[in-house]
Image (spheres, rainbow, N blue to C red):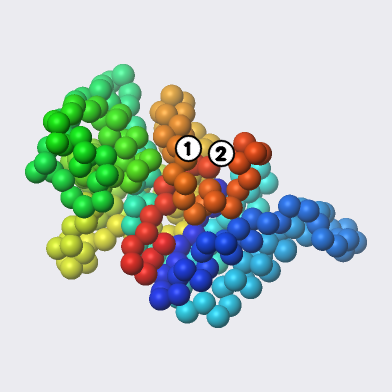
Amino acid sequence: AFSWALGGPEKRSLVGPRLGALFAVSSARAAPPAGASLESVLWGQLSDRVRELLRGFSGVVGVDVVDLASGRRLAVNEHAVFATASSIKTALLVTALAKLGTPEGQGLAVPYVARAEDLVPSSPILKTLALSGTSLTTRDLLGIMTATSDNTATNVLISRVGMESVNRFLDRAGLAKTRLGRKMLDGDAVKRGEENVSTPHELSLLYEKLWRGELLGRAQTEEALRILSVDKHGFLEAGLPEEDGVVVYSKPGSLPGLR
């Protein structure tokens, strides 16, 4: 489980090719100290490399990495609160599946007809479908929101699930600093100080709890992971070897000055 956030004028100096260096620790480069395991040496090298990348960076970076097998963690500014941009959509996805994705809820099959009046910018799928009045289900909207970060699909889902339902779900999960505070691209809400926020630790913990089946039933957990595994050709996947069959469960997000 891996979460990171950064903000500042030089954000692009950390991402791109150099991000891959964070994951380039695949073998020991020197003999470990007496009594040290290879794993300990590799984690030490990873920690050194992360801090090397952060030195001289003019913005604020938060990192939280956890090995789901051993519980070993690497964290920097992990409790700092950042705006989440589209990363908050993971919390909406999980809440929607918890509230609507059960036999009692019967909500994932409810239809929605794409409408031009619902459109907001950065809605690549819904913008096209609204021209023909295409009918979608809630399950379709969840996939579109996660795979393409479609903002109109997201706002329709927020209306269906309820903003307070998302935040109550986050409270029950022990993620008190992760908040859904506004719909996508609501500039007036931003001016009022209503923002979608979280910390690197809580975003990482959200994925850890989902992976361990602590948030949803088995069927809903599998559905959430299936949706999150769709290749988004993003900056996280870019540093991983495709031939090794590595699966990335993610929902990245970015705003000007933030990633």
Image location (x, y in percent) of residue 246 = 60, 40
Q: Which mark is residue 66?
A: none
| Label 2: which secondary element | loop
Q: First in sequence, mark 2 or 1: give its number.
A: 1
Give the residue pinned by disc 2: 247
Binning the other alpha carbons within 10 Å of mark 2 as few (below 14), some (14 to 19) or many (20 upward) gives: few
Work out whether 204 lies above or below 77: above
Residue that appears at 47% across and 79% down: 58
Q: Which mark is residue 229?
A: 1
Image location (x, y in percent) of residue 239 = 58, 52
Work out whether 131 lies above or below 103: below
Closer-to-camera residue (168/133): 133
Residue that appears at 27% across and 44% down: 124
Residue 74: tell me if it is visible: no
Side of 115 relative to 168 (left or right) = left
Does the residue at mark 2 contact the one at mark 1 (Cβ under 8 Å)? yes
Residue that appears at 14% across and 36% down: 131
Q: Please name the amino acid that badge 1 sits on.
A: Ser
Q: CA distance from mark 2 to mark 1?
A: 7 Å
Quarter where residue 20 is shown: bottom right
Q: Please name the amino acid that badge 2 sits on.
A: Val
Image location (x, y in percent) of residue 201 = 49, 57
Residue 137: tell me if it is visible: yes
Quarter where residue 191 is shown: bottom left
Placement of the C terminus among the 4 image quadrants: bottom left
Residue that appears at 45% across and 32% down: 226
| Label 1: which secondary element | loop
Quick one: which residue is furthest to the right in this view?
A: 34
Binning the other alpha carbons within 10 Å of mark 1 as few (below 14), some (14 to 19) or many (20 upward) gives: some
Image location (x, y in percent) of residue 3 = 50, 55
Closer-to-camera residue (15/155): 15
